[in-house]
Image (tube, rainbow, N blue to C red):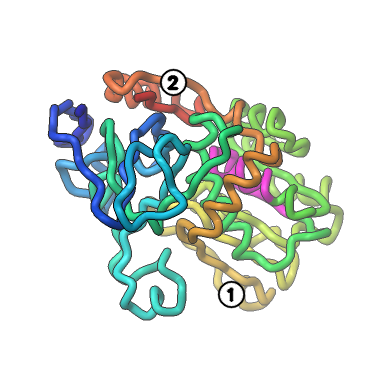
Amino acid sequence: MKQAVMTAPGVIEFHEVAEPKAGPDEVLLRIKQIGVCGSDIHVNHGLHPFTSYPVIQGHEFSAEVEAVGDRVGGIKPGMKATARPQVVCGKCRPCQRGDYNICDVLKVEGFQAPGVAQDLFVTTKDKIVLLPDSLTFEQGALVEPSAVAVHATGRARDLKGKNVAILGAGTIGNLVAQIVQCREAKNILITDLSDFRLDIAKQCGIPKTYSAYKESLADASKRDFGKDGSDVAFEAGGVEATIVAAVETIQKGGEIVVIGVFSEKPRIDLSVVGDRELSLIGTLMYKHEDYERAAELIAAGDIITGPLVTKHFRFEQYAEAYKFIDEQGDNIMKVMIDL
């Protein structure tokens, strides 16, 4: 079978390797589509601090069940599926209390463990999430980033009837905004520097968008939320300017959920955080129920996925896909690799 290996930053080699087989508690998947995410791009540029080379990438994907082990029940060949990419110990305190997404020795397939950039991939049955037949393989590959958004929105208290600001309109910020709508927020606004991404947000049903080039978050919040401002903010930009804006504009007692991955340490005024009793809340990845909920929301049409996909590339064009991403800059959302 074919396998794509990144041997060094920006260098992808294709190997022919033996086909894997499923063990008694394992599932053999035939990979169909792989989504390229921001962390993958960091690996391609040699900027991911926790990934070494060579590495087999790919962690957001859709597949068809090829075979199952002797002790696997309820999963049959031909079913559509995806799977969580987390490799956890099950023994540390976070794992023991059910928070395996922040396992003390967490590894993620595609980064610290081999990913799915190959024809066939073996995983354990507990990680499998079966997908409805109604979902396309493209939609199936978007379950993983949707699960990130499901988990992130769940880190805030009740969003019903609240004013919510999302800072960053990339794929994750877009999905957060869509899920916030599902949770019956009163008013939602989303901001970004890219007019392209803001247009995609509108196509996905987010009516209130604004360009951070043209208007400050404070002015936009006052216009859309009134004098009270936002109750909850989701930081999905990963830059100092967005987290500072969230702290400065959210109402007293508000919550800020930090989703973005910061390449540089931001400076924020913690005296404001304390004086206004703000809650800064972290979020990492997802749990199994977040994956299942993400699949349900996509299947029900509550998450619009079509506008999120900018372009597809064949498996053999993996390197070309990264070149395209670099050339397009902010005028791009999700790129898919088709096997």
Residue drawn where x is 66% and y is 34% of the image: 304
**Residue 172 highlighted magenta (yes or no):** yes
Q: Position of residue 124 (x, y in %)?
A: 33, 55
- Kindly identify which residue carries mark 2: 312
Disc 2: CA contacts within 10 A as few (<14), some (14-19) or many (>=20): some
Question: For this rendering, which residue is in front, 45 or 145?
Answer: 145
Which range of residues does the magenta coloring cover?
164-179
Q: Quadrant of residue 91?
A: bottom left
Q: Is residue 20 left or right of residue 317?
A: left
The secondary element bearing badge 1 is classed as helix
Q: Which numbered disc covers residue 30?
A: none
Q: Position of residue 5 (x, y in %)?
A: 19, 34
The answer, for residue 241, to whether it is visible in the render is no
- Can you say which quadrant of the picture contains the N terminus? top left
Q: Is residue 43 left or right of residue 276?
A: left
Disc 1: CA contacts within 10 A as few (<14), some (14-19) or many (>=20): few
Residue drawn where x is 62% and y is 28% of the image: 195
- Kindly identify which residue carries mark 1: 271
Residue drawn where x is 15% and y is 41% of the image: 54
In the image, which is nearer the foreground, mark 2 or mark 1?
A: 2
Give the amino acid at mark 1: Ser
Q: Quadrant of residue 204?
A: top right
The answer, for residue 179, to whether it is visible in the render is yes
| Relative vertical location of residue 200 with respect to residue 111 in this rendering, above or below | above
Q: Is residue 311 left or right of residue 125?
A: right
Q: CA distance from mark 2 to mark 1?
A: 47 Å
Give the amino acid at mark 2: His
Question: For this rendering, which residue is in front, 53 or 280?
Answer: 53
Residue drawn where x is 78% and y is 56% of the image: 163
